[in-house]
Amino acid sequence: MGLHRFKPMPSGRMGIFWTLSGIKDAAVVEYGCMGHNLYGSGLLRQTGTFEGKGASIYTTYIDETDIAMGDGHRLEDTIRQVIASEHPQVILLQPSAVPEVVGTDLVAIANVMQEEFDVPLVPIGHGSFAISQHKGVQDALCDLVSKLTIDCEPGAKPLFNIVGSCPDLFHFGEDMLELKRMMKGAFGMESRCVLSSDCTVEDIRRMGEAQINLVFRREGIPAAEWLKKKFGTPYVYGRPYGIQGTTDWLRQVGEAMGREPDAAFIEAEESLLRLQIERPWRTLKNNHWSYPDEAVISLGGHADVVAGILKFAMEEIPMDKGDVWCDCPEHATAEIPYLDENGWMPIVKNHKKGYLMASGEQLLWAGKNTSLQIANPDIGYRVHPYGAPFVGYHGAAELINLWVNEYVLTH
Amino acid sequence: MIADLSHLRRISTVRSGKNIKFLTPAVYSGGWCPMRIACNIVENTPGLSYLMVCMPECATYSRGFNSLPEGENGEKRWLYVLDANEVIFGCREGVCDALRQMEAEGAEAVMMVATCVTDLIGEDFEGIISEMQAQLNMKLTYVTLGQFKNFGTPMGTSKVGEALVPLMKKAEKIEPKTANVLFIEPWKSKTSPVKLPLIISALEERGIRVRHITSEATLKDIQEAPDAALNLVISPYMQAMAERMEKEFGTPYISLQNAFRVEDVDAAYAQIEKKLNVSLAGAFDGWRKKALELEAEAAEKLNGITYADLTEVDMPVALAGYLSDFGMKPLLIHLADILPADIQYVKMLRQKGIDPPVTRIMNQELDVEVIRDTLHPDLALGYVKEPLPGMPCCEEMTDFSGITGYERAVGILRRILTVRETGKMEQGGFDIYGPAPV
């Protein structure tokens, strides 16, 4: 990875840890040094994943003797205590960097220890040094569904799963609530499992009861494929942005389930929204007509978020495409390339006209408007999850609100 | 919750942090990593840059909300993140290139911070410095802070302090009326001044120039520190820095943090008077008188009182030594790490027949309950998340971090006596800058 001025792309281990953290009634036990867990837990609290909401998070610590002797007693003792004090339904095990360097085989250790404990010990993912945060999230989602789900069938109650709502994405909580609101309004459906930012172990076990899986980011596709193979559940991959984009997404979801979304709901949402945004939208539209060099949108962040907001801005406002980039080389396309800090630094620093939406860290560093943040690293707490989303009808209003305020600020 | 604590070792048998056992095994939710301590200290030092050599975890968590890669004066806060190959084959070449780039972009002095994996693979930072220092104008130093052998704040701060010494310049002339006060703290508020003991202002009022090698020091202050006639150490974490300065520059030091008793403070101040040729007569009369009164009251009221040290108690072993003067008996001491200076207090305690078990509290809420229910101390000292029925607690003991002299004795004893008598903390906290509470 080499020299970095800014926070580098997080490791696979971090992606796994953040993905596991939201599962209530589970305990996450990291085998290794303690800093990752302390600071990782702190970061989760910043995102709104507060104590008592998700998994209980523990670590073992590891010292020189443990490393030299390959002594795993700390892990065993920790598991025993966590079971006694937390009564988790499952213990999710994860190695930190040091055990990975010395080649600790957590799967084998878990298999040996399992004989002693009634609670399932589930090693999740791997701590490889070559995988990215995004691959870690993907692996963790896949492991969770393949290792925890039980045989079940859809019941009379219409249910859906969200796959890929995880705290590493900026505004994950707000976006997830908007998705739930729309699924209730358009299809009268409730969520069975929000994997993994808002679920219990039991929710994961019974994911097969859902009629559809909504894959909220591309990292969730392998998990959704696994669920499709296991339970026959169809899935729709995508993040709904914009007014038309959201309506199209709802229709796509309906199509996958063989039913139409509630036309009255869509009509009511669209009508209200068009009234709400009428004046700001005209301001933005006129700006594009009169000063097209100002009506340019530049975006950096998760590839799915960037692609979704870009499509909304270009097709429904309209705006023109500026510099866009994603934060993971494995997600790069010709349309949305991956840029490391050497790539995005000059773009962000030299940005003069138009709308720049990127991570809080990037916007703060460049002295830009930080309310246009769409990606992490974050620069503050997000204690409550009731803010405006970016996805769905409410998200469309929020994005237009942000853009028109940026217009007002700069004109 | 009652627990079997027979796994804990008594303090007399502990020679290093490795022998300090956790009270209960599971760590919730983690522990401060010393790499963050190093970054905080360097970020608070204008002119000084760091290059942390680390994994992505360290790189991300080394920074809080303020993730700017440059300080106000262009100081670099850069990260060298190991890839999968470097974990196996080392990162020397990449680190050397990074240092060249830091110099090219204007860094004046750089502290390299090695973390767990670099420590584990044995990357040779001394070798890197010996190769690179000849090629660079900027000064280099390094500190190795793998958490598996540097538990947290005490060892981390101590090592960073010591690692600042190679940045210092040998003085052409020693200034007889100049002293340094050594007190670098990693968690200093960025918006409030460092609190220093009254001896510092007393010396300044008497014409002594006291250079603050504190969390407000600049690189220049640190570089020029060897011209002082005396180092005043006021934190155990700065002892290593003082010792290394004495070895490399011949700067004598007085460890004020070790003087708890009034008679010990008297002796320390007499030494200062002699070394700096200054009179402190009358400077602390009010505080000294109050300290003597409280020591007498403590001997009367605290004899036989049992207590447990929780987390966030400054110098717990030395404090145990002081409190044993009044007959107080420690049932358990939380000790994040044992520092060399602690050994003298261990001996002192043993001579009095006191040899408590030591532990690391790593699961705050559970462990505090275990201590209450298993040991039943009359008092606790340190951090509790919220008041625990049945165990009155002297909280906010870090008020006394970096505070020495008669005022510390007053603050500590008044707090203990108040909690003992009322079961509650005194109102208003601890203010050493007001008039002496006579």
Image (spheres, rainbow, N blue to C red):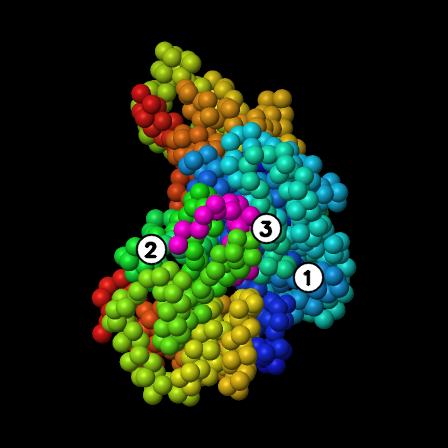
Q: Residue at x 51, y 80 (%)?
A: B348
Amino acid under label 1?
Glu
Of the numbered discs 2 and 3, the one sitting upstream in the chain is 3
- Judge from the rendering whether residue B96 lies leftward or rightward of residue A362; answer left or right: right
Q: Is residue B199 magenta?
A: no
Q: Give whichever of B153, B235 is nearer the camera.
A: B235
Count all numbered tags in the image, as a single digit: 3
Do the residues at discs 2 and 3 belong to one chain?
A: yes
User: Dot 2, how many residues are within 10 Å of its Cα: few (below 14), some (14-19), or many (20+)?
Assistant: some
> Most prominent secondary structure in the magenta stretch?
helix
Which chain is mark 1 on? A
Name the residue carrying label 2: B208
Task: Report the disc number at residue B143.
Answer: 3
The magenta segment: B153-176
Which one is in front in this view, the residue at disc 3 or the one at disc 1?
3
Question: Are circles 1 and 2 on residues that touch, CB within 8 Å?
Answer: no
Q: Residue at x 44, y 82 (%)?
A: B324
Q: Give whichever of A340, B170 is nearer the camera.
A: B170
Amino acid under label 2?
Ile
Which chain is mark 3 on? B
C-alpha span from label 2 to label 3 = 33 Å
- Judge from the rendering whether residue A197 lies leftward or rightward of residue B381; answer left or right: right
Which one is in front in this view, the residue at disc 2 or the one at disc 3?
2
Residue B275 seen from this side: yes
Q: Residue at x 39, y 54 (%)?
A: B176
What is the secondary structure assignment of the residue under circle 3? strand
Do the residues at discs 3 and 1 belong to one chain?
A: no
* Residue B226, percent from left and from top: 47, 50
Name the residue carrying label 1: A64
| Res. A337 image quadrant | top right
Which chain is mark 2 on? B
- Judge from the rendering whether residue B236 lies leftward or rightward of residue A221; answer left or right: left
